[in-house]
Amino acid sequence: MSYELEFLPVGENTKSGDAILFRFWYDAKGETEIDQKVCLIDAGYAENGEKIKQHMDKYYHTSTIDLVISTHPDLDHIGGLTYILENMDVKKLWLHRPWREDIINGLSDCFKDGRVTDNSIKNKLQEGLNKAYELEQLANNKKIPIEDPFTGLSEFDGVITVLSPSEEYYKQLLSEFRCTPEPVNEDDKNIITKTVEKIKNVISTIWGVDNLEENPETSAENNSSVILLLAINNKKFLLTADAGVPALHMAADNLENMGLSANCADYVQVPHHGSKHNINTKILNRIVGKCVDKNSKANKRGIVSASKIDDGKHPSKQVLNAFKQRGVNVFKTQGSKFITHSDDISQRPDYSTAQPFDFFDKIEIEV
């Protein structure tokens, strides 16, 4: 099969986000729109929706999207999807709907306030995740079928498969969402809110040594991200959205349950725009591999959806080095499109060859 996978630039200045297009052909060589299947994974901010349509008009010559996937409800991922559903022919939507009765049943028991009911939680989720709720209503009005993307859901005869979250894990995360009340266990709200100023030091790096936190934390919303495996032409692509360490371990578990190696992916999306809060040494050793010799040829590729202007955090140099020393050549968007494709597809004339990050000999760390 012929395929193209491309990451579109999202956000202005120091704002990052995700908008990923994937298309493939079952039979025809990838130079025609006949029989193509198109998938859109997130659509950045609200203003990115129209840009995605323009991009598809120019290169795909179609307004049809066979599958739209919303990985999680953060605005830098879901914002542009309203425009997409309103202005394009969408055949199917994958969207988490936490306000569903079977999802919230008994959830009120997780909160301190005894007055909280499942119905009040439902209302809070619909209000707090209003963009996702509006997307559901829009899809219903347009009669677009919706499925909740939990572990094992797949499409196109297994070309796209959900690795995480499971429905059970997703339910556990809901009590930690920002829009829900205070949980019974206050520690459950694992959202990063620490504002303690830390001292920053510039250090020299050593190949083979990760300068990563042992137990990084990210938000429950991020860990609810849909992690996907794309499998085509004996190539595997791991798309991680904003997932953190526990969610990535769940994805690795499910790869192994499928009879695959946890580090089977030829191509890995760097989680959460390269944030240091989403990975550690243990999970990288598992889903990418252990550090390789410095003179070894890179055998994997990575992509980071990063803001046009580097804010020093997205992507983190610590994270980029950690991928680089595991034999991964990491490429960035940072205001540019990035595409990878099967060998039978010609390079677009208005595109140039991307260059990966080099290993950073010096980085700034917080202590």
Image: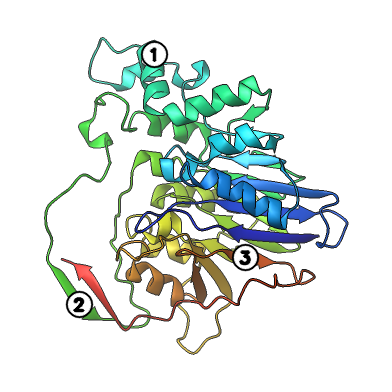
Mark 2 is on which residue type? Val
Is residue 314 left or right of 350 when viewed as pictured? left
Indicate which label's residue lies in the foreground, 3 or 2.
3
Residue 257 visible in the picture? no
Assign the N terminus to one quadrant of the image. bottom right
Report the residue at 56% width, 33% height from top.
95
Q: Residue at x 69, y 73 (%)?
A: 349
Reading the image, the residue beneath label 2 is 202
> Which mark is drawn over residue 118?
1
Question: 166 or 366: which is nearer to us?
Answer: 366
Q: Residues within 10 Å of mark 3 (few under 14, many from 20)?
A: some
The quarter of the picture where the C terminus appears is: bottom left
- How far apart in space, not on screen, are marks 1 and 3 (Cα)? 44 Å
Q: Is residue 204 above or below residue 81?
A: below
Q: Nearer the viewer, mark 1 or mark 3?
A: 3
Residues under numbered marks 1 and 3 in contact, where contact means CB atoms less than 8 Å apart: no
Q: Observer-nearest residue: 295 or 71?
A: 71
- Which residue lies most toward the bottom here? 295
Instruction: Write down the residue under mark 3.
Output: 339
Quick one: SS at disc 2? Answer: strand
The local secondary structure at tag 1 comes to helix
Residue 5: percent from left, percent from top: 65, 59
336 up-or-down from 327: above or below: above
**CA separation, marks 3 and 2?**
34 Å
